[in-house]
Amino acid sequence: MGSKWRKLKLALGLDSCVHIPRTFDDSSATGRFSGSVSPSVVSPAGDTSGYRPSTPTPSSSGLRLPKSGPKSPKGTCAICLYTMKPGQGHAIFTAECSHSFHFHCITSNVKHGNQICPVCRAKWKEVPFQSPTSNMPHDLPRINLVAARDEGWPTAVRRLPSPQGDAARPISSLYHVNEPAIFDDDEALDQQTSITHHKDETDHDKINTVEIKTFPEVSAVPKSASHDAFAVLIHLKAPHSGRKPHIGQNVESSPPDENTRASVDLVTVLDVSGSMAGTKLALLKRAMGFVIQNLGPSDRLSVIAFSSTARRIFPLRLMTETGRQQALQAVNSLVSNGGTNIAEGLRKGAKVFADRKWKNSVSSIILLSDGQDTYTVNSRPNTGTDYQSLVPNSIHRNNGVGMQIPVHAFGFGSDHDATSMHSISEISGGTFSFIEAEDVIQDAFAQCIGGLLSVVVQELQVEVGCVHPHLQLSSVKAGSYQTSLMANARLATISVGDLYAEEERDFLVTVNVPVVESTDEMPLLIVRGLYRDPITKEMVALEENIEVKIQRPDIAGDLVVSIEVDRQRNRLQAAEAMAEARVAAERGDLSSAVSVLDNCHKALSETISAQAADRLCVALSAELKEMQERMANQRVYEQSGRAYVLSGLSSHSWQRATARGDSTDSSSLVQAYQTPSMVDMVTRSQTMVFGAPQNKRVLRPAKSFPDRQRRQ
């Protein structure tokens, strides 16, 4: 019962500062609202006769508000923190967002032009004020008087301009949504804001340089010995972002200087099929509200909704104050019905990027679905399922001619097609996250945009070449990153692409070290790098080429294997075990799958990394055990095991954080690859709890199995 009540509160936004404004009806001079609560005033005696009732009507989204009417948390005024109760000598004002305040408190709060709800930060369209009206600014719109009095002051509610267009009207069917044939109506970018260089570009270059380190497996190999598959680790770390968010700051505070990070063009492709009805859709709207509120005025957002068909319900617009309000209204207009046509949603999302006139530095798609595409995916005899058909050719990452638009896919609940969603992300170069607990959706989105809003490196290419004339590269292990090896095996290139602030990448290359006769030091490899700075748009070469050398003594003593190399070997070994276990599980052999994972877990426990309590090794061990539990039987594997494993594989193959299970929970062991920017954004999401002083806020748990105790 407690879990259901918590979900209901989340659906109603009772612990959220993000409010999605409801629809307004301008035809009434009394300020009536369509699908919303009219601002109302209860007299000091508690009399509501002659006033609009404060009980809300159900909105078009399917939400049902409490019959007792809206109340501030725990029946207190959020401004003065004293109890509110009709008949205690104070008038009570109930705003259109359903939050209530003492009338004298809220009139004092808004008298200087503030139109923001102190609780949920929604922008009001009607605000209360006290007469005499001669004190009002001359440019205020016409007012509507409400027949209520408190100590002789006539009460009034000022009408603010209503949104234009159809964005705020509930969408009964996507087939009824009009859209242009060409999406070239994207809002123009302010070039001064979008590409202005830093005042001191010298300092900028010093800050924004990729750190590169190399670690040979051991520091020395005897002259008389050869060493096949000698491992060398190449470690990259992106620079920090100029943006330094404060974890405890109000999410509505002004965003930082937009020149400190690359601006983003983001398209969200959202499933609004019939299975999303109720709490799911409400939580999706809430999560989208968080995304909208955290985009900056130089970022642009477009929203695609899909069910049996797909429509662009919001064009590519700058997230200025006006843009945010319009985006919130568009999202709030969504209703759920119909089937699931993921391919059509992605086609419309790709079209937004293909048709736009202007381009921000960073482009990405966020895809969320809780179902299976029954319109496009076809199983063919002897060839398997055609997942390529789900992704438009223009955003395939390896076609050489398309746009670089990664799709970050989010599988919602236990009924989504994890294989399809994972395939979409792999084909486009994005990540796949598994949202198992419904109330984790906002945290999952927060982690994703925490990365997208901190891109500091683009188009990174790493080149690894052999120095010694008798050396050849035997392997380059780079996960899902595209690699190319020259025919003579002496030069390899790794296409890394974008990096988030302080994000790290590790690539393991192996060479065959031959016997030597005279030299005491042997050069092995040289590593170079080139990338584009998203702020200046210039190509930047790494300041120096890194040369890897080892000693070649006559006799080598006891040599210690580099813990950095051992750590990455463990990661690669675990990822290979996960992939092998998944293959076994897909053919129904769960016992073999569990055995593969268990054997890998035991092998990791004997490594020097495990003995040193290395954090990554601990996380890998915890993840392997979690996967074993999710392969306990076929039902558990179908419900959550497959999605959990695929999300883990996505994370390890790209070395980028994905949401799965309780991975966004601050106490979770499975938090590999999270960057500081991601952690900041997730913390911001989890501390959005109102009704208590800020220093008493607690993190909302995001556990994979809410009714199961955490394993010790």
Image: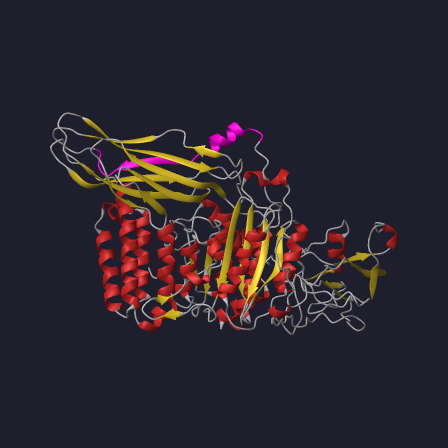
- Tell me where residue 204 appears, x and y as whole percent: 51, 32
Q: Is residue 575 above or below residue 464?
A: below
Q: Is residue 361 left or right of residue 474?
A: right
Which residue corresponds to the image point at 43% horizontal and 59% vertical from the top-left?
Answer: 424
Q: Position of residue 656 (x, y in %)?
A: 40, 50
Residue 541 occupies which quadrant of the picture? top left
Q: Quadrant of residue 92?
A: bottom right
In the displayed structure, does residue 254 sit left or right of residue 600? right
Is residue 216 located in the magenta-colored stretch of the structure?
yes
Q: Is residue 698 visible?
A: no
Front-most of residues 78 and 54: 54
The answer to whether residue 489 is seen in the rendering is yes
Q: Position of residue 419 (x, y in %)?
A: 39, 64
Relative depth, front residue between 376 and 706: 376
The part of the chain drawn in magenta is: 199-219
The residue positioned 43% from the left and 68% from the top of the image is 377
